[in-house]
């Protein structure tokens, strides 16, 4: 199984999109991951960018979209993770979110789905971004 | 009433499992398989995250790596789970310890994921979903 999925289309018989949620606040991660699963997506979870890369490099796991917080502990923040994804997994789209004011220009160069999603975000906004990406890929 | 006349209805709400494992890839694979089997699964990557979840969310079973980094590690999480007001079943795993040290069901790493699924199904008496 390839780690880079090419099936972002929303065909009725297509397998569900797989989302990797990267968030260091466990209860926030739990809530959004649970919501996305309720919406029919397959969801994996990572605590930080290093974990996200370990999952993205795993041959057993295929990810379509990374939804990542910008502010995370460790050597890489969400921007660095987005750059890594662009360099190493170009078929995977990235949606970034942040609780503090950051340059929307930086996010716009890294994300296909528009500017940063500002925290706190309604869970439905994340689904809307995912659907935008899926529609663009159609 | 004789035992033969008692009808046991299947539980409607799937059990909730907290998977605590600092190896992200292994946690991802175990959690994904358990969700496929119908369980509701929460994930924690550290003892701190596990304690946060235990304090906020009711769970039925804790599948816990004892080799978590940090002070207290997995043993502290297991201790907290055992002292919980509501009963939580515990299954432990470790690469460095042996099951003789702990009172709970134990899986020595590296384990096969079906072993985890079987151990959890036995502990919770939760039937697996029929194969599609």
Image (cartoon, coloured by chain):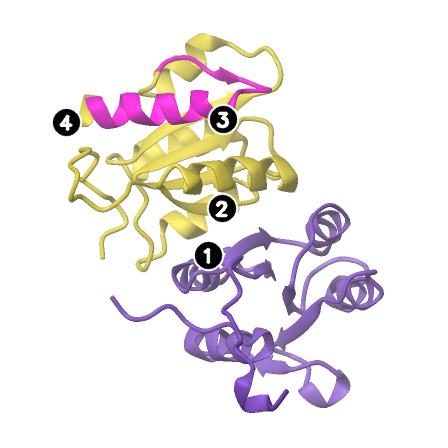
Q: Where does the C terminus of chain B fall, quadrant-wise?
A: bottom left
Q: Categorize mark 3 by other alpha carbons within 10 Å: few (<14), some (14-19), many (20+).
A: some
- Tell me whether circle 2 and circle 1 mark residues in contact (CB < 8 Å): yes
Q: How many C-alpha atoms fall within 10 Å of the one at disc 4: few (<14), some, or many (≥20)?
A: few
Judge whether B108 appears above or below A9 on screen. below
Q: Chain of mark 1?
A: B
- Residue bearing mark 4: A138
C-alpha distance separating marks 4 and 1:
28 Å
Q: Which mark is residue A64?
A: none
Residues at badges 3 and 1 in contact (C-beta under 8 Å)?
A: no
Give x and y (percent) for residue B32: 42, 58
A14 to the left or right of B83: left
Question: How far across and how far down the image is residue A40, in percent?
Answer: 35, 41
Q: Relative to B55, is A31 above or below? A: above
CA distance for labels 3 and 1: 22 Å
Q: Which chain is purple?
A: B
Reading the image, the residue beneath label 1 is B28
Residue B71 seen: yes
Asked if A109 appears above or below B28 in the picture, the reply is: above
Measuring from the top left, give residue A115's x and y in whole percent. Answer: 42, 12
The chain painted yellow is A
Q: Nearer the viewer, residue B130 or A105?
A: B130
Q: Look at mark 2 in the image and give the residue it sits on.
A: A45
Question: Circle 2 — which element?
Answer: strand
Quadrant location of the N terminus of chain B in the rendered image: bottom right
B43 in magenta: no
Give the SS element for disc 4. Answer: loop
First reached walking from the N terminus: tag 4 or tag 2: 2
Whether label 4 touches label 1, CB < 8 Å: no
């Amino acid at each position: 199984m390839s780690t880079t999925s090419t099936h972002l289309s929303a065909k009725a018989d297509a397998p569900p999109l797989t989302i990797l949620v990267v968030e260091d606040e466990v209860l926030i991660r739990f809530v959004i991951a649970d919501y996305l699963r309720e919406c029919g997506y397959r969801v994996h979870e990572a605590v930080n960018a290093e974990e996200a890369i370990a999952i993205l490099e795993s041959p057993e796991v295929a990810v379509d979209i990374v939804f990542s917080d910008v502010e995370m502990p460790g050597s890489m923040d969400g921007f660095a993770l987005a750059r890594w994804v662009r360099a190493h997994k170009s078929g995977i789209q990235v949606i970034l979110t942040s609780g503090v004011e950051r340059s929307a220009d930086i996010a716009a160069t890294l994300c296909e789905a528009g500017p940063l999603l500002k925290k706190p975000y309604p869970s439905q906004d994340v689904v809307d971004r995912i659907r935008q990406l899926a529609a663009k890929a159609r | 009433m004789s035992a033969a006349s008692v009808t046991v209805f299947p539980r409607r709400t799937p059990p909730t499992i907290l998977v605590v494992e600092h190896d992200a890839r292994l946690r991802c694979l175990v959690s994904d398989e358990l969700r496929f089997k119908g369980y509701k699964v929460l994930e924690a990557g550290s003892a701190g995250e596990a304690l946060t979840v235990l304090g906020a969310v009711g769970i039925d079973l804790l599948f816990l790596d004892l080799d978590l980094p940090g002070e207290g590690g997995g043993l502290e999480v297991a201790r907290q789970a055992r002292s919980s007001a509501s009963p939580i079943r515990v299954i432990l795993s470790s690469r460095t310890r042996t099951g003789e040290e702990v009172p709970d069901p134990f899986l020595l790493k590296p384990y096969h994921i079906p072993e985890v699924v079987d151990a959890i199904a036995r502990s919770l008496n939760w039937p697996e979903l029929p194969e599609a």
